[in-house]
Image (spheres, rainbow, N blue to C red):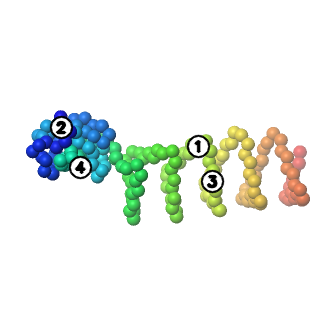
Amino acid sequence: MLDCAPNDMLQPSLASGRVQQADRGACLVAGPFGIVRAQRAAGCLLEPQAGDTVALFFAERGAWILSVLSRTADEGELALPAKTAIRARDICIGAESGLELQAPQVRLEGGLLVQAFESVRTFASKIFEKASLRFGLFGKSAEHVSGLKETKASRMRVSLDENLRVRSGSADVKARESMRIDGGHINIG
C-alpha cells in the first residue's frame, strides 16, 4: 500500500480506482497503480463508500479523491464543512417518500411561511407562540385539555350563529361591575 502517489505519477495526474475501504476523510483505493491511501478532497461532497469508483488526483504530497464517479449502493451522505450555507434565488428540495430534519435547534426565518399539508401532527413538551394577530378558519375544531386551561385577555367576545352550551361540575362567574343576561326566554334551575 502506498501513502502517496506512485513513483511514475510524481507529476500531477488523474486516474480512476475502486474504493476498498472507506473511513471518514481517507480511503484505500485500488487501481492499475496498486493500492493507495487517498484523502477526500474538499470539493468531493459525496462521502466515498467501499465499492465506489472514484476519480483520483495524484501529486507529490499524496492522492486525493476528487469525486465519486459511480456507486452500486442507493444511498449516500454529503460531507460538508462544519458551517455551511446554501444560497440561491430559489431552492426546491423534493423527496419521493420522506424528508427528515434533525438538529438540536431548527430555525425558520422569512417574510411568509406557507404550509400546505393533508395532515399536520405536532408533538412537543412545550409550545410558545407570540403574534400580534392570530386568525384561523376551521370547518370543525375540537380541543381536549387534561389539566387547567387558562385564558387571560383584556377583552373577550364570543359570537355564535346558533347554540352555546356550557356544562361543568360547578361554575363560578364573577364580575366586578355589572353582569347582563338578556334573552327571549331564560330558565334558571
Cα distance, mark 4 to mark 3? 47 Å
First reached walking from the N terminus: tag 1 or tag 2: 2
How far across and how far down the image is residue 185, in percent?
Answer: 86, 55
Helix, strand or loop at label 3? It is loop
First reached walking from the N terminus: tag 4 or tag 3: 4
Cα distance, mark 3 to mark 2? 59 Å
User: Viewer-nearest of labels 3 and 2?
Assistant: 2
Contact (Cβ within 8 Å) of mark 1 with mark 4: no
Cα distance, mark 1 to mark 2? 53 Å
Asked if residue 72 shows in the view, the reply is: no
Residue placed most toward the observer, 101 or 16: 16
The answer to whether 3 is drawn above or below residue 156 in the figure is: above
The answer to whether 4 is drawn above or below residue 87 in the figure is: above
- The residue under label 3 is 129
- The residue under label 2 is 2
Amino acid of disc 3: Glu
Cα distance, mark 1 to mark 4? 43 Å
Cα distance, mark 3 to mark 1? 13 Å
Residue shown at the point (13%, 42%) measured from the top left:
6
- The residue under label 4 is 66
Amino acid of disc 4: Leu
Residue placed most toward the observer, 45 or 154: 45
Residue shown at the point (30%, 47%) measured from the top left:
46
